[in-house]
């Protein structure tokens, strides 16, 4: 029973974190630009997108649009962030 309760609490925290994460967008129609964030040393595009989302969250953004990605073995990316 105790393990079930702990599992439920962990899943609840994961759900709350996902719900507040900045969302990647393709168009910034009607959104207010807040600035730019960057991330480095990602091994995959998903990892890079997640890192940019975390940086956008830290700045209080609700969404972000990836502007560029570069790299061979490790990726670097830049994204605009929006309210």
Image: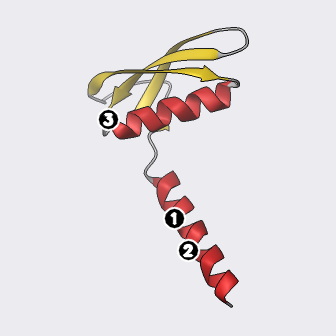
Would you identify the image quadrant in which residue 60 lies? Answer: top left
Res 24 visible? no
Of the numbered discs in the image, which one, if any, rests on residue 13? 1
- The answer to whether residue 4 is left or right of residue 78 is right
Q: Position of residue 76 (x, y in %)?
A: 57, 15
Label 1 Cα neighbours within 10 Å, binned few <14 / some 14-19 / many ≥20:
few
Please report the residue visible at 53 percent of the width from the left and 32 percent of the height from the top: 51
On-image quarter of the C terminus: top left
User: What percent of the width, then of the height, locates residue 48?
Assistant: 59, 26
Question: Where does residue 17 sit, x and y in percent of width and height?
Answer: 48, 55
Q: Is residue 19 visible?
A: yes
Sequence-earlier tag: 3 or 1: 1
Of the numbered discs in the image, which one, if any, rests on residue 9? 2
Look at mark 3 in the image and give the residue it sits on: 59
- Report whether 41 appears left or right of 78: right
Mark 1 vs mark 2, CA separation in Å: 6 Å
């Amino acid at each position: 029973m105790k393990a079930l309760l702990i599992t439920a609490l962990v899943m609840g925290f994961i759900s709350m974190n996902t719900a507040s994460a900045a969302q990647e967008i393709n168009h910034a129609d009607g959104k207010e630009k807040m600035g730019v964030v960057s991330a480095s040393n990602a091994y995959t595009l998903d990892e890079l997108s997640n890192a940019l989302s975390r940086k956008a969250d830290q700045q209080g953004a609700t969404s972000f649009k990836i502007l560029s990605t570069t790299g061979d073995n490790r990726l670097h990316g830049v994204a605009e962030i929006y309210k």
